[in-house]
Amino acid sequence: MKQFILIIVLISFFDMFSQLPIMSPFAKSLGASPAFIGLIVGMYSFSNMFGNILAGYWIDKQGGKKVLLFGFPLTAAILLLYTIVTTPGQLMAVRFFHGLFSGFLVPAAFTVLANRETESKQGKSMAISGVAVGISAIIGPAFGGIVASKYNVEWVFIIIACAMLLIAGCSAFILPNRSVTLSSKVESSFYTLFSILKTPVLAFSFIGAFSLMFAQGVLAYMLPLQVESLNYGTHFSGMLLSTFGITAILIFGLPTNRIFDKYPHHHTMVLGMTIIGFALILLSNAASLPYLFICMILYGAGFAFLFPSISAMLVEQTDEETRGKAFGLFYAFFSLGVVAGSSLTGILSVSFSTGFIIAACLLFANSIWIFIYFKRKAALHEGME
């Protein structure tokens, strides 16, 4: 059962990662201007935020299984629309609905996974789920690029759509039917999105998600430019990103994942943010290929500490009646971080060195703020005793 849920997580992220290397050329082939290409690429993340939030409400009312059984076939249908678009405007519309409906999948998958684990094992569970995310991040872009170049870009969408339909069919029989009983707290709308955002630990989880993906957005935008400026082949950009992913997967999947249940999640969260910040500072001055690979190994280690920590913090601060909305918000902040990171550095027209420093400063500032909060909370608790 758990392995099947991890396959669901992998397919949900694989959909997004597989289109990274093909969407810009696809939009260009339809006659889109450079500015419109940027809008087309960013539209997925923009509408994905709304899909995440809508999914949160639906998950808490109907359960994650029903959302997955609806989301996978609908997303598959939208994927097939890519094969018939002929204008940039049509592609923009398809990207909007693709982001919106695929936004149902990840919060539902993680909610189903979280509801199957005991509280004491949430850190390890989220770390193992990170393996699925990391694998999709490594093989997704390669799959999209290879299939599009050897066959046709339409086949990327067709194959993923078929995989989603297959997963939806299997989910109907494999995933358990979980009845969701709404308490008076939910019926009175006490747990609204605003009240979730006001919960300090949940807010820090969302801040961690935003910070992580802000850095990821900057990295995806700036690293290829840095590699190009150093006169290395473009394939090294993919190798460097794979290095960060492989490092994270090793930490997620090896016995090292036990640390996520051994130490407080806010400790590993702050550690992860700090490590990523240092990796970005080092990247801003990197001038050789070996140095770049070392930086990406360090970045991958920081990612591996941060992602399970913020996910486990969210799970521990919610119950089955509110977890869907919380995960919806969580992945909305993921999407917002990617959009903000890549867009801000693009609008400011900064160099890759400055872009990395901006992202590092955000991570350092948030990690210091979170560290001070929990330090004061611990001191207050000791004083009361």
Image: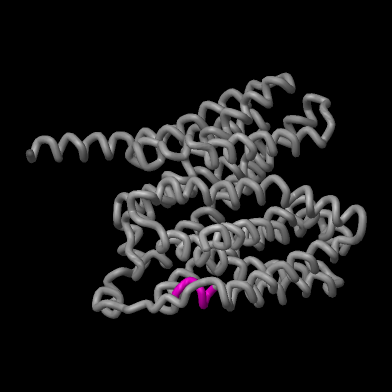
Quadrant in which residue 68 is drawn: bottom right
Left or right of 181 on screen, residue 327: right
The quarter in which the C terminus is drawn is top left
Kindly identify the residue that appears in the image at 40 percent across and 57 percent down. Answer: 117
Residue most toward the right? 150
Instruction: Please tell me whether residue 240 belongs to the stretch shown in magenta.
Output: no
Q: Residue at x 31, y 56 (%)?
A: 317
Using the image as rendered, state which of residue 236 and residue 341 is in the foreground: 236
Measured from the top left, where is residue 314 in percent x and y? 38, 54
Residue 244 visible in this rendered orientation of the protein: yes
Residue that appears at 80% across and 31% down: 228
**Where is residue 220 shown, x and y percent of the image?**
67, 42
- In percent of width and height, residue 160 lies at 74, 65
Quadrant in the picture for residue 243: top right
Q: Main secondary structure of the magenta part?
A: helix
- Color encoding of the figure: one colour
Image position of 9 with respect to 234: above or below: below
Q: Nearer the viewer, residue 128 or 344?
A: 128
Residue furthest left in the image: 385
Q: What is the span of residues highlighted in magenta in the rendered image?
A: 63-67
The image shows residue 331 at horizontal and vertical percentages of: 51, 58
Residue 92 appears in the picture as rendered: no
Closer to the camera, 112 or 226? Answer: 112
How many numbered discs, if any? 0
Is 358 rendered above or below residue 190?
Answer: above
For image coordinates 92% across by 54% down, the residue present is: 150
Q: Taking 380 as reference, is 39 above or below it?
A: below
